[in-house]
Image (cartoon, rainbow, N blue to C red):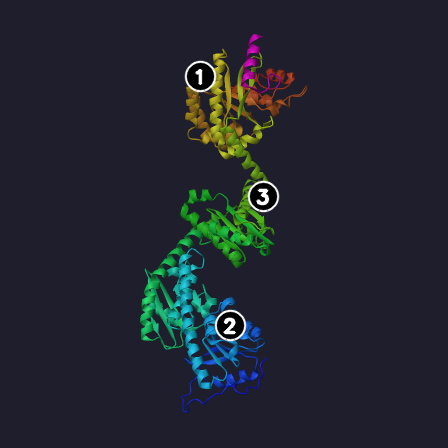
Amino acid sequence: MCPSNYENDELIFLSEEKGAETKVASGFWNILVVDDDEEIHSVTRLALSDLIVNDKGLKFFHAYSGAEALKMIAEMGSSLAIILLDVVMETDDAGLKVARAMRTELKLDEPRIILRTGQPGYAPEEQVIKDYDINDYKTKTELTRSKLVTTIIASLRSYQQILSINQSRLGLQKIIISAANLMEEHSVKNFCEGVVTQISSLIGLDAGGVVCARAGSVLDRDDDGVYILGAAGEFASYINEKLENLHNVKIVSFVNRCLLLKQHIFEQDFSVLYLNSSGYEAAVYLQIGKEISPIDRQLLEVFLSSVSVGYENVNLFHQLRTAAFKDWLTKLPNRSEFINMLDEVGSNKLTTSDIVVALIDISHFADINDGLGQDVGNSLLLSVASRLELTFKDKVKLGRIGSDVFGLIGPEFFINPQTIQELFVSPFKAGEHSLHLGASFGLARLTSKIQSGINILKQTNIALNKAKKNLNTNFEYYEPEMEEQTTWRLDMIRQLGLDFSERKLQLWYQPQVDLVTERVVGMEALLRWPTSNGGFISPDVFIPLAEYSGLIIDIGAWVLEESCRQLGVLSALGFTELRMAVNISMPQFRDPEFINIVKSVITEQGIKPARIELEITESIVMDEPQIVVEALHELKEFGVKVAIDDFGTGFSSMSYLQQLPLDRLKVDRSFVNEITPGKSAFIAETIVTLGNKLGLSTIAEGVEKREQASYMLKLGCDEAQGYLFAKPMPFEQLVVFLENQQDK
């Protein structure tokens, strides 16, 4: 501590001129006095208490050590105008350390430093001012009141100029950053805040004001209210709110007046500036405290004409972003934005507990569109969106994920099957129509594990797909095993496609025999998928996967081509009367090229069409009967034979039996297995009898025992296939099998 009694370095304050006009301050300059002597604080405060500079008085803050000073400087930052700093306090250079830390560590260059010392030998004047950006350096004996006032006024001017330059730089920086990041969500806000700050800086004022526009001009809102797009100063918390929420009658009145008159309004203590570019209008309200000078008005005119172009651009980009992330019909977040919302929730461990994501898929929406028209369909979607918003309000986040799929994110208390079911109890209004809707729901509970939004959506969609296939209920919660099954299915489909392209699939053949002579009359081509370990994947597993993925169309064409080719080889070996049965699936019937493929393959291989028998199942007939019936009639005219497989396992194909151009009925193995000694097989008998009455041949599948063959023969069945006669075999073994039979 320095001694408090100075002999020659005490502060001497001379009187100001008498008769000076008394002024009333409209604000304050913040002054920090740093000295370890309480008396210095008192006399400084006394000497400067009535000083007013640019309509502002001085507000004093006090620190008694370097450490205390640095703490206050860090807290107050650029709001400090001047620091009256003692050099020698707890150490000989404590004041210099404060100056250095403020400039280099805290990066504060606006506050001005007036260095005071009672021991000048500790601080060489020129070096100190140069190194630490000191405004003035005086010994305490030099600082009379007049000199102190002069130094304070000069420093305040310097502070004001530096602050104005920095404010200008910050305002420009905000505008530039906004222009560079216009695709960000708050680009309009940042741009407008930069406009307020920049205008205030240009005319030497503290930033404070709002930028407002009508909803119809620049915002995607349905009303015509005036909203705050950006703000600075005391109004910063009102961004995106209606102007009325400021609860300031003067601001509301003059902003609306500015937009109505389409011109600037300059008043004594505020101004409202009109901004317009290609129909994008805005009003910039500035809380000034004094009237803007004519020179500043001209400056603002030039600046606003420049800023208008940026204002137009920022709004155009905002509209593009809205189009990219908002559903055009319902104005709800679209799929991309919904994923962003899931990203935000999934990345926060603290918010995921009790959070559920749900997808709602409206049942048979396409039928409504087709039957009642797209306008009714759109009205219906709006009605669903409206009910979701009214039901959940701000408790649940909503989105439209697909044409008829809505997404929900929120607490499980609100998002659960029961709550969602209740939404669909009453009908929905769509124009003049009142429609009851059904829906399927997929739900996923979030865990504390951090997940990406796309992964959460995938899991919820897996649950939704399972719910749509569930015959007992219309909702499912995601379980990890669902994804494992999906992953397994996709892996199998991928491997099936790869193996098919590498020609690893095989065709095996099971002979079909005449039950009377037990001579081979034909073969059924059976697809086999070998594994790397020498086994085979069951057709019951991979055929549905091939149908699901669409691979069955190419695989089916290959099966037909290979069967015809190898039938040609058999013909060359002398087996000219054998027929080949080939299974056909529903996706093949849906293929527009299916009929042409069958005809061209048979023709190219030089096979008589009557030697090819297309096998269809009863379920295929019932899937889309019209397509199947028409295709089979055309192929029947071409000459191919038609057999119906697994006959009797369904319930409805009897009604289509007479429409189908059939040649043969196949008795399913399940009915053949019912044949046991002393017991009749009623269904097998019925099918054979029906076939005979309709003039169709019959063939029994899965015949493994002699008594089964005998029983079917007594019923009048024509043919059979099964392990009793021959197992399925590769083509080379088939040739040997046929040659051996021919030799008998």
> Which residue: 40% across, 48% down?
375
Circle 2 residue: 99
Marks 1 and 3 in Cβ contact (< 8 Å): no
Q: Position of residue 608 (x, y in %)?
A: 44, 16
The answer to which of marks 3 and 2 sits earlier in the sequence is 2
Q: Residues within 10 Å of mark 2 (few under 14, many from 20)?
A: many
| Residue toward you, 99 or 399 | 99
Residue 283 percent across, percent down from the top left:
37, 67
Circle nearer the viewer, 3 or 2: 2
Q: Residue furthest right?
A: 678
Secondary structure, mark 2, is helix
Residue 728 in magenta stretch? yes
Q: Which mark is residue 473?
A: 3
Q: Which mark is residue 608?
A: 1
Q: Residues within 10 Å of mark 1 (few under 14, many from 20)?
A: some
| Residue type for callout 1 | Lys
